[in-house]
Image (tube, coloured by chain):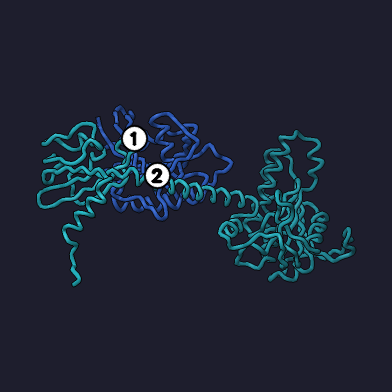
Chain colours: A cyan, B blue
Amino acid sequence: MNKPHIPKSISQRLASYHLANLSPAWVELAPNTEQIKSIGGKWQAYFTKQPKVNTNISDYCDTLQGMLPIEYAFELPHMQLKDNTYTDIIAFEDVSGGWLLFLDVTNNVLELQQYQQAANELHLLKGQLDRTLSRHIGHEIAQLAVDGDIQLNTEGERKIISTLFVDIRGFTNYNEKVDAQEVMNTLNAYMHEMLQSILDNHGIIDKIMGDGIMAIFGIAASNNNHVEDVFQAGLTIQQRIKALNEKRAQRQQEVLGVGVGIATGEAVLGILGSHERRAFTAIGKHVNLAARLESNARAGEILLDEVTLNALEKTPHHRRVNLELKGIGKVDVYTVVLD
Amino acid sequence: MIQKKICILGAAGVGKTSLTAQFVYSKFSEKYLSSMGVKIDRKVVHVDETDVNLMIWDVHGEEKYKKIPTSYLRGASGILMVIDGTRIDTVAVAEEVRQRVLDKLGDVPFVYLLNKSDLQDAWSINENIMQQLQVTGSPILLTSAKTGDNVETAFSTIAKAMLPT
């Protein structure tokens, strides 16, 4: 026969089994007050002096100040009533009045604390990793990598991507005539505008080379075609640099321009380097072409290859230019006519 | 003397215990120790010619699988809501906790503390987030438990907000 209720002897056994290490103490309160009617159990574990009948319990346990009388049952888990001890306080009412139950859960909490500490440290570490990656490859791709949704491996993956190179014009001359600290401040100001334009348009920073950047598009998730993203990044760079230069001119600071080169094609993506030092990169013919376009672009100019121009949904105003590019030969390229 | 209970809340690792330790004991430790449950500290602050005995409930951090029990909020007159200025995800946690506090306590004074202001290089609170916090109408302070910047101000601001006008 299946009995629905736990026999009294079993519940007593269970209670003594579970309560044995909890040093229970209890306080009975007069109805709707915080006045002590009776006290029992191991009160020494929770109070520095014995609570007396007809006095207020919060005089002995200031944690309870403002919490009584017990209007409805509540629990205060893991209260540090004394240094290095943890107490669960359980408050409830029955027909005779209110009850406060004190249980020493120190051992349990200290064990939990070990797990909690490890879990929190891991969480903080994951955040640090995410932020470090974000600085190099943008938040979006960093999040994908941290979550394991993309693999950055050494085997290499073939993919059609767009590559953008941008470089500050006349920086070498500027570098030679100005104090190093000022050069660093100027470089950071221009770099900030260029990097932000790339990251805002789902580009990944492949390399920062002195005063130039190589960025690739078509790897980070985007709602747009990567050709639209790379073109938008190029435009944004020139717009932001123009705005920066206006501010710098007002402050009588040196004004510099940037040249942008963009090309699209197949590349092998992967990790280069040894076990100790590795870097994510893209290798392909169009990458070299983009680099050559950038080195031919004048300050304020964006040069595109034919593949990029043809892949754009809306063809921008442009002029065709036939250039002799080092290592590539004569090629038609397109300079974007900016407003 | 007026006595007021305040709760210091926020995500894990934002610096709640460090801010309390800096305020009460003028101490700071670089070592991160995850808090469990609640530790209560007290300190008297003097605001507008009134001594306010602050009972500071330093509550464990809010986590996905370990929410702050609303029973801890019982009797609280003010909230210090801590955000780690270098971790943007702690803003959403603060917002979630704020909603729970408002449901439980109604319209109590809040002060937002954007902590770790000494880590400017890693700072990730942008204009949009500042505007989002400003909409709440609660004071916002940049604090550093490490250097002590604005820590006294944080506690006196909440003490003042709790005093009857």
Identify the residue under disc 1.
Answer: A83
Q: Residues within 10 Å of mark 2 (few under 14, many from 20)?
A: many
Identify the residue under disc 2.
Answer: B81
> Residue A141 occupies which quadrant of the picture?
bottom right
* Chain ID, mark 2: B
Q: Amino acid at mark 2?
A: Met
Q: SS at mark 1? A: loop
Give the number of marks: 2
Q: Is residue B140 visible?
A: no
Q: Is residue A167 visible?
A: yes
Circles 2 and 1: CB atoms closer than 8 Å: no
**Point 85% across, 63% down: residue:** A321
Q: Residues within 10 Å of mark 1 (few under 14, many from 20)?
A: few
Relative to A243, residue B160 above or below: above
Residue A201 location (% of width, % of height): 64, 59
Residue A93 location (% of width, % of height): 16, 50
Q: Amino acid at mark 1?
A: Asp
**Point 47% across, 40% down: residue:** B32
| Quadrant in which the N terminus of chain A is drawn | bottom left
